[in-house]
Image (cartoon, coloured by chain):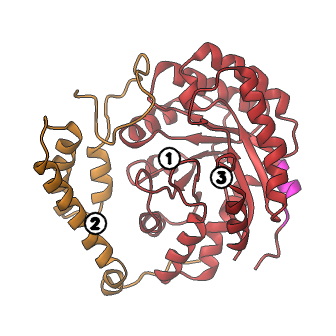
Amino acid sequence: MHYIEPHAHMVSRTTDCYQSMALAGCVAICEPAFWAGFDRASVEGFRDYYRQLTDYEPKRAAKFGIAHFCWLCINPKEAEDAGFAREVMAAIPEFLGCPTVLGIGEIGMNKNTRNELAIFEEHVQLALDHDLPILIHTPHLEDKRKGTRLTLDALAGFAKLDRGRVIIDHVEEHTVRMVLDQGYWAGMTLYPVTKCSLPRAVDILETLGTERLWLNSACDWGVSDPLAVPKCGLEMTRRGHPADLVRKVLFENPRRFLAQSPRFAGNFVSEASP
Amino acid sequence: MLLRMLSKRQIADLHFLDARCHLIDLAAFLDRIDRHQGEPDFRVAALKAAIPLLLAEHPERAKAILDALSDHPPAPIPAATIQGAFGAPTSAL
């Protein structure tokens, strides 16, 4: 069964991961801009990173028949230095014309600070100015609930925002309803220990249905599994859910959201996949 | 497309041993903490405070535990002093 991985940090993964994902049926990967594991020292450091996302990673993915797309931003951890963040954000439009850039992401909160909130709102405005979809990160662990509320309250201030073009990622049981109830898409991240497990993700699907929900691995340089999405498809099958429902969650839902970016709709064609 | 729902027995067949393992791991973790020296840790206190929620009669135990392990003050903080998170509320520290 073909699937889409809508959130993976392939800059931190080896080529073996691309091969494994291709063998597992992955046909497209979307990679949001994120923290390197350290704070980058300059705007040029971010330019180099954006070049890697828009140029090298698509080439690396293509060797395995996988279409690679990306989202651009300055990540929440580095948004605390608001002055520096604004300098980085001024460079983002240079890359928005690249053929694999889908939108602005993954923006959001980290420790739920005033500066993070200000930079988040400026990113939302940037997305609106360029008519782009938005991918939002919600904070880790004890910060997630508060960060999700701050995110939703901030988004409510943008009257022209199309909520159907916004996905709020890394939801868990205590945040998923507040995201879906306000008309946004919600992403469940299958990341060991600190985020959703495979059985819990299927529990959420069984409880809330499959509309406006996607699965992702958010695999990165930590202990994480680039095959978490197809494994969750297997978990759905173990629970007795039909193949067409598994395909809906693993392929049709991300395709439907991502196709709101003309870059995805134009580049990616897999309508006849099994 | 409809979700198909298994019976309680079938769900137990799939997941009981995993849940049993996690419960034993949790118990062993608390034993391990007791066996070692040092000051009490706020994270362990938060974990112990959340454990009774497992026995609630309503079906949203996971949500209740996540809420119990969350920071709740609504306003953004003035500035970040760290970049990471702990897994237990820090607002009372």
Alpha carbon distance from label 2 to label 3:
29 Å
Disc 2, SS: helix
Location of residue B63 (image quadrant): bottom left
Q: Which mark is residue A13?
A: 3
At a point 20% along the width and 37% down the height, the residue shown is: B42
Instruction: Identify the residue position indicated by label 2 in the image.
Output: B22
At a point 49% along the width and 84% down the height, the residue shown is: A240
Q: Chain of mark 2?
A: B
Alpha carbon distance from label 3 to label 1:
30 Å
Q: Chain of mark 3?
A: A
Q: Which mark is residue A179?
A: 1
The N terminus of chain A - image quarter: bottom right
At a point 42% along the width and 26% down the height, the residue shown is: B82
Mark 3 vs mark 1: which is more N-terminal?
A: 3
Disc 3 and disc 1 on one polypeptide chain:
yes
Q: Which residues are magenta?
A: A262-269
Q: Kindly indicate which chain is depicted in orange in the rendered structure.
A: B
Alpha carbon distance from label 1 to label 2:
29 Å
Disc 3, SS: loop
At a point 28% along the width and 66% down the height, the residue shown is: B22
Query: Which is more foreground, mark 2 or mark 3?
Result: 3
The hue used for chain A is: red
* Magenta stretch secondary structure, dominant: helix
**How crowded is the residue under tag 2: few (<14 C-alpha within 10 Å), some, or many (20+)?**
few
Asked whether residue A256 is drawn in magenta, I would say: no
Q: Chain of mark 1?
A: A
Residue A16 visible in the picture: yes
